[in-house]
Image (cartoon, grey):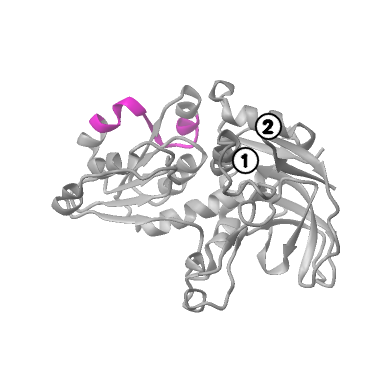
Amino acid sequence: MLQAQWTDTGIGLHDVDPGPLQPGHVRLRVTACGICGSDLHRYRDVGSQLGREVTPGHEFVGTIADGGDSGLPDALYGVDPWQACGRCDFCLRGHSESCRHGLLVGVFVPGGLGESFDAPVSSLHAQDPSLSALEASINEPFAVCVRSIHLAELKLDSRVLVIGGGSLGLICGALARDFAGHVAVTTRYPHQTEAARRIGVEPVAEADTDAFAAGFEPDVVIESVGGSANTIEQAMNAARVGGTVVVQGLFADRVAFDPRTLVFKELRITGSKVYGQSFHGTEFAAATAILPRYRDEIHALQTHQLPLSRIEDAFVTAADRSQRSIKVTVVAD
């Protein structure tokens, strides 16, 4: 089967033997896989080794090519890529997101950017039949944002500012819109501004963030940028006294912030890693359940689709903002 692998200059396809199917697994025929911001970090930083030893891709769906002894029907399934052990003290207390032995597919174990993927049955989530494979492939980013919204503890009159107009920031904006009184999302590019308006939240030009926040006084600020920018300090400065800051972005470097802001404003700052448990099951399952009602928002975010045979072009498109990309998805040939 063809499988994406990192190269010294970028990414390419290699023909590999999938091997025998392991007990408790099914072999999926991957139909769509989104390119995540963390994938782009590895694509740009060819000198980094973390996650470059394995096939990337953790935002994917597929149909069953070999069900083994699972008895599962041949439907469309999303894959929860966070492989928690289920046995450590955190898992046993219902905090699988903090599993001591947890591994993320596409970073520590081979991912879904290929023709097939062997998934543990326990990680599969059947998608609503009304969703296409392309639409359903955004299940994983929605799960990331479901957790962030849970941690934000929004009220019906909450004012929410999301820093960052990428796919995660816009999804957080769409979810917060349905729980809070007023939601704004900062945007850097015109196509992000257009997408924010399409999903029903207020766009704020990135350069105007501080001035906007001074008048808006958000109760909750969700940071979704990461990288090397000091958006944590920006989020702390933007939040009102007694506000909450949810840090979702993955940072490449250490960033500094003034702890006096934390103390004097009595802020609550929490990180948002991956999806965990909710009241009625996993947050990944919760995201799967609500996904169909956000079809219009999904269409605003999924801007580009390229076949697996053009994997390098897909990453070039995702990395080049002049292409007006928000979510680039690799689809089966």
Residue 99 counted in the magenta span: no
From the viewer's perspective, tell me whether residue 47 is left or right of residue 18: left
Quick one: 252 or 81, which is closer to the camera? 252
For image coordinates 59% across by 72% down, the residue present is 85
Between the C-alphas of marks 2 and 1, the distance is: 8 Å
Residues in magenta, as a range: 195-211
State the image quarter where residue 64 is shown. Answer: bottom right
Circle 2 is placed at which residue position?
A: 314
Circle 1 is placed at which residue position?
A: 35
Residue 209 counted in the magenta span: yes
From the viewer's perspective, tell me whether residue 157 is left or right of residue 262: right
Numbered circle sitting on residue 323: none
Residue found at the far left of this picture: 264
Secondary structure, mark 1, is loop
For image coordinates 30% across by 31% down, the residue present is 209
In the picture shown, does residue 12 fall above or below 83? above
The quadrant in which the C terminus is found is top right
